[in-house]
Image (tube, grey):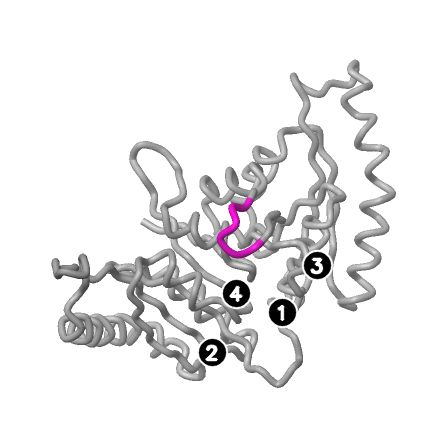
Amino acid sequence: MAHAIVTGFDGSARSEAAVGWAAAEAALRGVPLRVVHAWPWLGTARADRPAAVAPRHSALPELDELAERLRQVHPGLDVVTEAVADDPADALLARATDHRLVVLGSRGLGGFAGLLVGSVGLAVAARSAVPVVLVRDGAPAAPADGGRRPEVVVGVAGESAPAVLEFAFAEAERRGARVRAVHGWEAVPFWTAAGWVPPQEDVELRGAELRDELVKALVPVRSAHPGVEAVAETRTGGAGHALVAASADADLVVVGRRAHRLGPRLGAVAHAAIHHCAAPVAVVPHD
């Protein structure tokens, strides 16, 4: 199932939302969906340890019912379910290498009120070798049909990663969506009697320069996806705040995660998107 999508299910509302989103994505891509239910177990599950396998038997009927509901919503979708006694993050990471995408649920209150994102979601997003999408409870499985054109928002850093842009444009192409490429930056202030303020002329000039650079950075991926409309946008206030502000009406937000020598971790922009964007957030690993 190298081209399949894998998602985690624990019975919660947020995992239901994630599974629904993953099923819609699998149907869009025409690939199978693997639904994994994992529970922590201290020690190795063995045939002589019946307590380790009991939760699996109790989970199977619920997984079968979930798979049947997904097939009814998406006729023809190939759904495979699996229950395993293992740490959920470890179980999903072990399967991620054989799949194209991991989809997990996250929880929170929205805005900048201080969210809680599940530790499993954060661990997998920080360590996965393939893109991970985190979906909030209540997020629609597909773009709403309200006359508004769907939009994929992607955060673009100074050194834009081709893998991140390619993921965003490919997702937009599948959905008939527009891409909004956002680069956030901080204006250098100067001192006046009213305090530290940026000179407006410098802000406008620097913003125009950065937008030109952003447009140039999009040329290769726009050439690869000529049917996708793209908007280049620069905003002051920092990369994280700019991305969150631009994504208010987004259907999907895409951010990059750079590999670090000191070990896997999520950067500040990825954290901002995961914690504060209401839309599903795709974290794409890159060099």
Q: Residue 258, how many percent across, how many down? A: 34, 47
Q: Which of marks 2 and 1 is in front?
A: 2
Disc marking residue 28? 1
Q: Quadrant of residue 78?
A: bottom right
Q: Residue at x 47, y 66 (%)?
A: 247
The CA distance from mark 2 to mark 1 is 17 Å
Q: What element carries label 2?
A: strand
> Which three-letter amino acid code belongs to the residue tagged 3?
Gly
User: Which disc, if any, is residue 178?
Assistant: 2
Q: How far apart are marks 4 and 1 (CA)?
A: 14 Å
Q: Earlier in the sequence, mark 4 or mark 3?
A: 3
In the rendered structure, which disc, 4 or 2, sits on the residue that comes first in sequence? 2
Q: Mark 3 points at which residue?
A: 20
* For residue 83, side relative to residue 236 (left or right): right
Residue 109 got which mark?
A: none
- Give the spatial CA distance, label 4 vs label 3: 15 Å
Q: What residue type is labelled 2?
A: Arg
Of 32 and 182, which appears nearest the observer? 182
Q: Which residue corresponds to mark 4?
A: 252
- Residue situated in front as seen by the camera: 40 or 130: 40
Name, please, the residue furthest toward the top: 48
Confirm or deny contact between disc 3 and disc 2 (CB under 8 A): no
